[in-house]
Amino acid sequence: MTSTTPTTASLTDRNPQVAPERLLAERVPPPHFAGESFDTYRPDPGHPSQAAALARLREVAETLAAKRGGLFRRKPVVPAVYLDGGFGVGKTHLLTSLASAVDGAAYGTFVEWTNLVGALGFRPTVDALADRRLVCIDEFELDDPGDTVLMSRLLRELTDRGVALAATSNTLPESLGEGRFAADDFLREIQDLSGRFEVLRIDGPDYRARATVTDTVPLTDDQVRAAVSGVSGSTCDDWATLLRHLSRVHPSRYGALVEGISLVGLTAAGPVPDQDVALRLVVLVDRLYDRDVPVLLGSAGAGELFSAEMLAGGYRKKYFRALSRLGALVDRGRTEFVQP
């Protein structure tokens, strides 16, 4: 697990360039869920909606397999399912399981899909996805009017060409955009999106115990430096310096930014200064979580990173998801790399 070779690597020394073709090739379930399937999902008996969602997604997979085999005599209804629920109830587990069960599925987070359209262009993206049986969209959120119109048009064209859809979110489709922009001005687009999905509600508590996550006991900066110094493939960065670096790297390249990293150490961590920085941090945490990269935070607990105003605002669900995921990575980092 560890090496005696000290590390001086830094994320701020990295400025990866990612070809558009790679962005498309990477639209598969992330490594964190590579070994997961419908069989490894364990529904909570106390929340029957979890077992119901699992059963429905198995049916969707079977429907798409029948479509592949040409067993339909009439033009089939194209499935479009939307998994709605809180943090840590297994939505992403189910979505990645569906993607893995369907040959020709494409998978990505909402941000990754909008970034792909930005890199390839709208029409080339549609054409590249038109022959896929299924497109999966994790963490569906509409942060601005442009994304609303873009995703509405993209999903409309894909379903019109026979591509099935599956998505996850912490917000019901008809409520997308609330608290972030004048959703009423784009009500038609939002209604068009919501009308395309069958909603599967998944109830239950966060299995990662977010109450504990957001009250993480911080390490000192010296503890972080000592822990990463003997770990091969680790990095160590000053918090504020890394946040400034993120503004110079497009979020579509954050996956490449942390590729091959075994442990991320961050010193002098503290509250993020504004919402633009906070949203970039959310994307970075998602990419770290996708790749199971443990994290060590010096000087601040995870719960202090976002202000009370941010946690009460329109992006609060993004921030709580980031806290939940970051807390899990920090817990793993402490367990594996910090001496008790």
Image: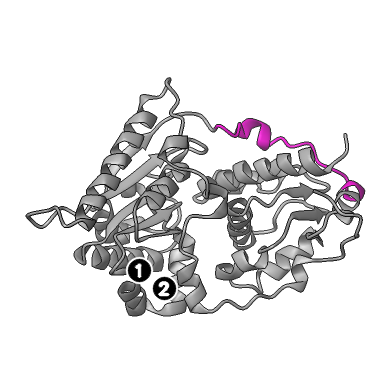
Circle 2/circle 1 CB separation < 8 Å: yes
Q: Residue furthest top?
A: 46
Tell me which residue sits at (61%, 54%) in the image.
Answer: 291
Which is more toward the observer, 55 or 311? 55
Way the structure is coloured: one colour
Vertical placement of residue 256 versus 62, above or below:
below
Q: Amino acid at mark 2?
A: Val
Question: Disc number at residue 238?
Answer: none
Q: Is residue 115 visible?
A: no
| Mark 1 residue crowding within 10 angstroms, few (<14) / some (14–19) / many (20+) | some
Tell me which residue sits at (57%, 67%) in the image.
Answer: 251
Q: Which residue is mark 2?
A: 117
Q: Is residue 283 visible?
A: yes
Place of residue 308 in the rendered image (x, y in percent of width and height, measured from the top left): 63, 43
**Is residue 203 rendered magenta in the image?**
no
Q: Which residue is mark 1?
A: 150
Tell me which residue sits at (70%, 55%) in the image.
Answer: 272
